[in-house]
Amino acid sequence: MTHIPTCKITVLKTLHHQDLAEEYRRQDLRQGPCHFFSEGDEFTVNYLAERPEGFGCDWAWDDIHKLIMILMTGGSFKNWMQNENQFITCCTDGIKPVVFKIERITS
């Protein structure tokens, strides 16, 4: 049986662009940063692309799971990152994006 590495997802920042929200977002919707995550939240992925318990946003998971797959299948980001076993990314919400650090913690 092949060993699958473990990955950790850490929430680095939860942002909110108030100017964009005022101009483009429906005012009857919840305002402020994403309510699914808080800075410092951590999630562990123990099996190939299995969404960790408590990871609350379907859209964010869809945005980052391909990067997790790269790390869990032996790929690296050495062409872009100081640590080839890490990648910094964010969800696609342009008004209230969440920035994640994804890292392979076992190999």
Image: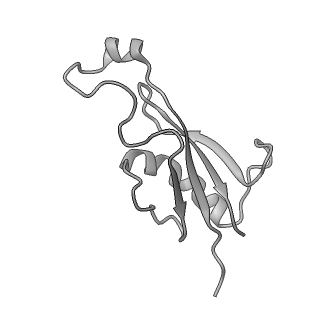
Please name the residue shown 24% across and 21% down the image. 26
Q: In this view, does 98 lie to the left or right of 89?
A: left
x and y percentages locating residue 74 in the rendered image: 71, 65
Q: In this view, does 24 lie to the left or right of 99?
A: left
Q: Is residue 67 left or right of residue 41?
A: right
Please name the residue shown 76% across and 41% down the image. 80
Q: Quadrant of residue 66?
A: bottom right
**Snapshot colouring:** one colour
Q: What count of labels does the image hold?
A: 0
x and y percentages locating residue 98 in the rendered image: 49, 36
Check the image and report above or below for 14 versus 27: below
Check the image and report above or below for 57 versus 93: below
**Quadrant location of the C terminus?**
bottom right
Farthest-out residue, bottom: 1
x and y percentages locating residue 1 in the rendered image: 63, 88
Q: In this view, does 56 lie to the left or right of 87?
A: left
Please name the residue shown 45% across and 40% down the image. 38
x and y percentages locating residue 86 in the rendered image: 70, 50
Q: Quadrant of residue 59?
A: top left
